[in-house]
Image (cartoon, rainbow, N blue to C red):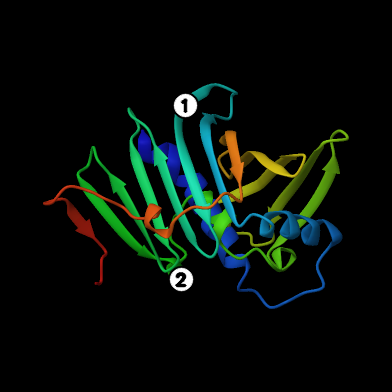
Amino acid sequence: MQQFILKPVLALVMALVFSSSAVAADGSAEAAELASLLKSYETYQADFIQIVVNENGGKVQESRGSLKAKRPGLFYWETRAPLSQFIVSNGKTVEVFDPDLEQVTVHKLDDRVQATPALLLSGEVDNLEETYRVSGSQVSADTREFTLEPKSADSLFVSLQLKFFRGELQEMRMQDSLSQLSVLSFDHIRLNEAVDNDAFTLEYPEGIDVIGDEG
């Protein structure tokens, strides 16, 4: 069940990371506005609740955890028990530690592998319009929403919605091609506080299986 919950969200954010490598385009005003908001986050720390809803509106699962992200490319993502998982990036690789499986999987960022929503907060976000149709709406005087729709037909998700309240990212909603909705709600948000680079390291017991580590 754990992998079922996390996989679509992880795949979606890696796609966002690679949108920054596209050729520069004129871009829409909404895409530029979204990029400007995200780039203003030198660091982002928050607790989160993740809820997955199926196509019939039924809740499949709920998990909680915390994250911290720092530009360029550093993040630490922890999902608490009973769905315990740790995902950490140093800007070049992503390590995924599943305590229940006693396994660490190591990926290169340039492999377009699965990652975590924290990458959106620590990676490059320029030129989103090259890969996504970006639209925006003013929900209220303090709330702004952006919707990203992939231009590629083989994308693993249909749409991603980001909600900002007074400039703070407070919610992400991703709908996949199977009509499954993943909702990430952020709380106790701390923007641009100093975070030491040593905080973005993954610690795990000796003897754990490490897969995909090319040293």
Q: Is residue 212 left or right of residue 128?
A: left
Q: Is residue 146 above or below residue 184?
A: below
Which circle's residue, 2 or 1, is located before the other in the chain? 1
Secondary structure beneath dot 2 equals helix
Is the residue marked by circle 2 packed among few (<14), some (14-19), or many (20+) residues within 10 Å? few
Q: Nearer the viewer, residue 121 or 198?
A: 198
Q: Quadrant of the N terminus?
A: top left
Task: Give the residue at mark 2.
Answer: 110
Q: Can you give x and y, in whole percent of width and height, for residue 150 in the image?
A: 67, 57
Q: CA distance from mark 2 to mark 1?
A: 30 Å
Is the residue marked by circle 1 packed among few (<14), some (14-19), or many (20+) residues within 10 Å? some
Residue drawn at x 25%, y 71% as measured from the top left: 214
Residue drawn at x 39%, y 52% as measured from the top left: 199
Give the amino acid at mark 2. Asp
Give the amino acid at mark 1. Glu
Q: Quadrant of the C terminus?
A: bottom left
Q: How many marks?
A: 2
Q: Nearer the viewer, residue 132 or 68?
A: 68
Q: Residue furthest top?
A: 58
Q: Is residue 72 above or below residue 102?
A: below
Q: Is residue 17 left or right of residue 25?
A: left
Q: Residue furthest bottom?
A: 23
Q: Can you give x and y, in whole percent of width and height, for residue 203 in the image?
A: 26, 50
Residue drawn at x 47%, y 26% as measured from the top left: 62
Task: Give the residue at mark 1.
Answer: 62
Q: Can you give x and y, in whole percent of width and height, for residue 37 in the image?
A: 73, 54
Q: Nearer the viewer, residue 155 or 110?
A: 110
